[in-house]
Image: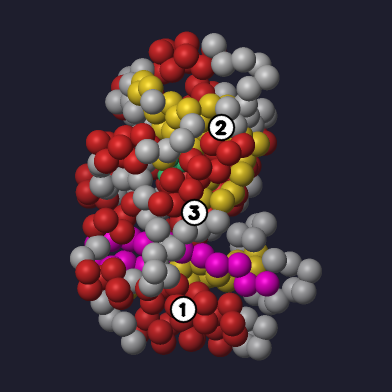
Amino acid sequence: MVIHTQKETLVQTLSSVSKNDKIGFVPTMGALHEGHISLVERALSENTVVVVSIFVNPTQFNNTVDLEKYPRTPEEDISLLNKLKGEVIVYLPEVSDLYDGTVAAKKYNFGNLENEMEGKHRKGHFDGVGTIVSKLLKIVKPDTAYFGEKDFQQLQIVKKLVALEKLPVEIVGCPILREANGLAMSSRNKRLNAKQFEEASTIYKTLKEVREKFSSTSLVGLNALVTERFLQNPNLKLEYFEIANEKTLKTAIRKNKDSKYRAFIAAFAGDVRLIDNMPLN
Ligand code: PAF
């Protein structure tokens, strides 16, 4: 496995990949877990060469404490990737390799996708995501890039970004991997203590209940049910619950039989912010 810390050498290595070979790309912020590994394995099964970037992108954090506390485990990450069969190239840059001069995000208009849910609660977050994903896609120039559906809003925004910037890459969304208790796998789970880890499964259980009751219960009733479930678990603080149209990400105000809906939750376990989502129909 080759590790590049500078984009110039990465670009040089990738320039020797034959035009007939496919390049897959998995962008990550490190602290890799089985969810990331499933993306890399999928990429390896569909491409000749796979690039994995490990970079905690400062411009997508709206909270400096969250940025400071974000888990960083590069040695473990490398050893996990080393165990995989196939050609993985790691890009592990410093901030200065991706941002020259000021560390700032470009302003994007993603057709309002950026103003819903995560965008409302993490101001500027998707400008940061758009900025870094655009930079990385222009460096790696992959045929296909893989993103997890846990960050469903991010996945939709990345598809929009690629269309806006006319980048020749296919964006593939991959299913959420879960812990045995249902909690969605996330790098942030490393910051939960054992009690929080168990209690955080309420997020999954609640989403599952919403899915089961979606066709028989009104939207108002489902909102009340979620509020109730979180009141029953005071150690978990609900930031938002939304039932939204999968395409527009707008809050559903009625159930339209031709639309696809998804339920989204963001909640805090202590100071650890967790998100999850589930398709409803
Ligand atoms: O999903 C993530 O880990 C990050 O948002 C990404 C896509 C790697 C951009 O920093």
Q: Badge 1 is on which residue?
A: 206
Q: Badge 3 is on which residue?
A: 151
The CA span between labels 3 and 2 is 19 Å
Part of the protein shown in magenta: 266-281
Mark 1: few, some, or many residues within 10 Å (few <14, many ≥20)? many
Mark 3 or mark 2: which is in front?
A: 2
Q: Which amino acid does label 1 sit on?
A: Thr
Is 279 included in the stretch rendered in magenta? yes
Splitting the image into four quadrants, where does ligand 1 fall? top left
Please identify the quadrant where the N terminus is shown.
top left
133 left or right, relative to 53: right
Magenta region's main secondary structure? strand
Secondary element at tag 3: helix
What's the residue at 40%, 84% (across, down)? 229
Marked residue nearer the N-terminal end (1 or 3): 3
Secondary element at tag 2: strand
The CA span between labels 1 and 3 is 18 Å
* Mark 3 CB lies closer than 8 A to ligand 1: yes
Q: Which colour scheme is used?
A: secondary structure
Residue furthest to the right in view is 258
* Foreground residue among 185 and 49: 49
Q: Which amino acid does label 2 sit on?
A: Gly
